[in-house]
Amino acid sequence: MIKKRITFGDAPLAIEDITSLAQGETLATLSKTEEFNQKIKAGVDYLQALLAKEGEIYGVTTGYGDSCTVGVPLNRVHELPINLMRFHGCGLGDIFSEEESAAILAARLASLTQGYSGVTPELLALLVTLLNKRVLPIIPQEGSVGASGDLTPLSYIAAVLMGEREVWYQGQRLSTVDVFRQLDIESIRLQPKEGLAIMNGTAVMTALACLAYSRAAYLAKLTTRITAMMSIALKGNPYHFAEGLFSVKPHQGQNQIAAWLRADLDVVDQYNTEKRLQDRYSLRCAPHVIGVLQDALPWFRQFIETELNSANDNPIIDGVNQKIYHGGHFYGGHIAFAMDSMKQAVANLADLVDRQIALIMDTKFNQGLPANLSAATSSHAMINHGLKAVQIGASAWTAEALKLTMPASVFSRSTECHNQDKVSMGTIAARDCLRVLQLTEQVAAAGLLAVRQAIGIRQHQKSGDCTLTSHVQDMYDLLVEDIAFIVEDRPLESDLRSLTKAIQQQKWSLYGA
Ligand SMILES: N[C@@H](Cc1ccc(O)cc1)C(=O)O
């Protein structure tokens, strides 16, 4: 199969370009335009000219960070990036997955191809080769304060470019030298500015934010579908989602959620006096809860894509206009804020679905469904506990997700002799956000298990009013294919794991996407 190519250096990239590269669905390529090549060349030439004149360039003829007052003589400038990469080789914690590592490579390439980092075409080409051949740096997750860029984790990319440390290759953790030898890839000697250019930026947090965005957007849709199925199984009131009602509170995303619920449910404006007049908030206010995330998605996208398509390096080298700027573009405040906000909005979805599950298990609220949704009958009924433990699990995952919503960006620490005295902690925020997404996906899996079981029971009960609209019927049929109806108690771990995986693979097409 011929894979589509994503071009770096032409038009701005979208989040989806990074996620498809991360998953290996597309390949990377560099712009072939004259303008791009000129820009890259101008940066390299300008740096060389400056060096020849012995001009002072931060991080090229000086030490790093607070050590910028230490001069580096010309005969030592080539060793400086090697030391930079080496002393930052102190990352700890879990290793980023292959997908995450590929996203990080792609995000760094997106910044360097803006043409303001003074890197050589050889360096850009090697990054493309690594991405396309899926030779992906082993990068430990911990050790970045997110505002000298992601220095420590990105040092693992710099090391691999120089043929050092380790890579993921075909699912295995191998030494870079061995894989380069096997694939005939040549390492490079980093030019004086290139160590900083690779490391002094926000690529780790930005890549993680791209991956988080698509999962959050899917969860907004999925929890809407779960709400619709919960409402049906709980004999809820669809008129809580009426168009007229929502027209008077016009948040766009919230209205979108209500419209999706209307498409899933037969909504009549007239209320039904046989039913409880108003449902509990986890049903009635679902558009208001999910709508917060839905309304925030456009600005998350704007923050993430602007960062992705920026030169988040220091110093900035404008070779075309022969200018060099010293600043702080490695500061990841926008991504930090987006990730801290996203994790809050997503954790609220976990809480919403957890409350819905609590309602549907409990005979005080579930309108005639059996306790714990156990379908066991007669002599076995008393020893069966159905989804009781799944509900306890969902509450545990929810509590863990809610606990992680503490913003990371407010925990700035002054570091590095008070040079980096205000930092973003954006990478911690992004890692928290991914963990919150995982936990919320697990809660959604429990929610799917519950609605599949509850609707199954309703259909056995033949209580008459469990008709499903066509979208919901299609989804229910797919769930029935994957998840067997639970009659006698059975371990549900594998069902929950496969549902969580299906959510992450965005298995169900929801609301026209
Ligand atoms: N980010 C710093 C550079 C730096 C690099 C490595 C360090 O260990 C510390 C600081 C700057 O551009 O000012």
Image (cartoon, rainbow, N blue to C red):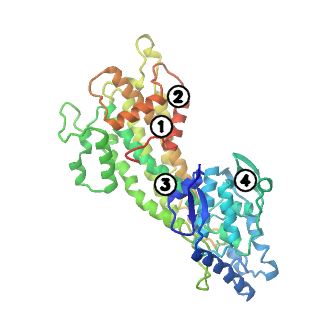
Amino acid of disc 1: Ala
**The one of 410 and 307 positioned closer to us in this rendering:** 307
Residue 248 in the image: state x and y as whole percent: 22, 54
Q: Earlier in the sequence, mark 2 or mark 4?
A: 4
152 left or right, relative to 339: right
Name the outermost residue toward the right: 75
- Residue at horizontal 66 percent and vertical 65 percent from the top: 151
Q: Secondary structure at mark 1?
A: helix
Sequence-wise, the earlier of marks 1 and 4 is 4
The total number of labels drawn is 4
Task: Name the mark on residue 167.
Answer: 4
> Are the residues tagged 3 and 4 within 8 Å (C-beta)?
no
Ligand 1 rendered quadrant: bottom right
Q: Which residue is mark 3?
A: 213
The yes-or-no answer for disc 3 within 8 Å of ligand 1 is no
Distance from Cα at disc 3 to Cα at disc 4? 26 Å
The answer to which of marks 3 and 1 sits earlier in the sequence is 3
State if disc 3 and disc 2 touch (CB < 8 Å).
no
Callout 2 amino acid: Leu
